[in-house]
Image (spheres, grey):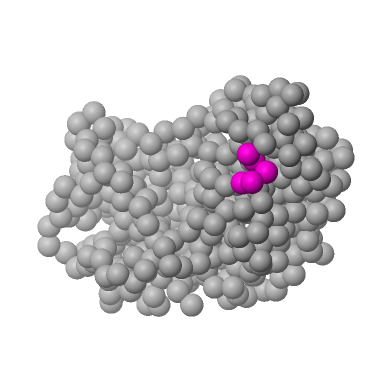
Amino acid sequence: MAKAILVAAPSSGSGKTLVTLGLLRAFRNSGLRVASAKVGPDYIDPRFHEAATGCPCYNLDPWAMSAGQINALTHDLAAESDLVIIEGVMGLFDGPRGAKGSTADLSALLGLPILFTLDCRHQAQSAAALVHGFATYRSDVHLAGVILNRIASERHEHLLREALGSRVIAALRNDDELAMPSRHLGLVQAQEMAGLESFIEAAARRVHHPDLLARILDLAAPLHTESGPALLKPLAQSIAVARDEAFSFAYPHLLDGWRNQGASLSFFSPLADEAPDPAALSVFLPGGYPELYAAKLSANATFLDGLRGHPGLIYGECGGYMVLGESLTDAEGITHPMAGLLPVVTSFASRKLHLGYRRLTPLSPAPWIAPLNAHEFHYSTLVSQSAAEPLFDAADATGERLAPMGLRRGRVMGSYAHVICEAL
């Protein structure tokens, strides 16, 4: 039976991603079969996890997913691993207003202990009060140990260890060379990062102390899992999926789930001017960073003509939705024609953050019939849209009704929402 542990922190920016990457690679280098997961709707961190482990990283979302769905995913992760390390999201107790969805909620659901990663750059003895508060805030959450991160000196470490006592299981010095680059939507994608392998190995060396790895294994809890329901029905029994730096936001749990339900997947690169397989019954354009490659995508006639002429269902999410539209204006204000399959014009010239969970009710006909849980996260704005059928009725995480999301025109449809799973 695989064991598992959660890496959490008091807030975003505490260094839990770097600690997680280091532990994943250090355990892998020690000979353990290690897998990973990420709490919440995140496309960036999981790709770094996969680079560290060589295995798929699943998203586990206590807001969107039922207990059965989460158990099914952890069952799949545990099947081929000795240890599963799960990276939390934001601060330990942070989540949607009035609903479950935090790292603490996942810890309580799965009965997993927490490695608490504490950014110590601007505090010393006061850290003890902070840790005490987090450790006692909820009785169903267990802080198994504290990792002191970004320690400035030996004296700094001594002060912290003296204040926190036996809770401390590791003290990691600050290393500016291990800072992770970022852009407007978060971290630069793993496949774009020069020297990624060297970076991960350096992170592993930072945490690779045999006593630390042994202690984490002792603290980890057995992962009791069972198979469960599929999270989302496939678009069709054969699906052509766009995959490259512009279209990289596809959840592995959905793609694997479609395969497990008998769907065959083929992949194509719009940036390499490849067309979707014309024999596929459907095309999926996931989100990503099309705004960074808008000029190239606009000039790739093989891709665009193949998309326009495809006879099957075509579905786009967020960035994919924008590419299905008439045009996309980049951050420099340059407008680039897109596929023109949906009457939508989008722009990055005037950025505005749209963020939050979404409950979607498909409007017939749509790719799915059942209600869906989804997430929206983008900075582009909808400049205009012409008459077309709305795709989803929408509400936010609290149930407050929103304007309908997405459009459908014939066999082509899409929206800004990233679908996570069926709402069970």
Q: Is residue 419 in sight in this rendering?
A: no
Which residue is more in the foreground, 308 or 88? 88
Which residue is more in the foreground, 265 or 366? 366
At a point 53% along the width and 45% down the height, the residue shown is 11
Where residue 271 appears, as percent x and y from the top left, is 39, 37
Whether residue 65 sits left or right of residue 21 in the image: it is left
At a point 77% along the width and 30% down the height, the residue shown is 158
View extreme (left): residue = 387
How many numbered circles are shown? 0
Where residue 56 appears, as percent x and y from the top left, is 63, 51
Q: Is residue 250 in sight in this rendering?
A: yes
Question: Where does the magenta region start and end?
Answer: 126-130
Where residue 164 appears, as percent x and y from the top left, is 74, 42
Instruction: Assign the magenta stretch its main secondary structure.
Output: helix
At a point 73% along the width and 31% down the height, the residue shown is 159
Task: Please identify the quadrant where the N terminus is shown.
Answer: bottom right
**Residue 59 found in image quarter:** bottom right
Where residue 180 appears, as percent x and y from the top left, is 54, 31
Question: 185 above or below 237?
Answer: above
Residue 128 lies in the magenta stretch: yes
Question: 333 above or below 288?
Answer: above
Which residue is more in the foreground, 392 or 340? 392
Which residue is more in the foreground, 138 or 391? 138
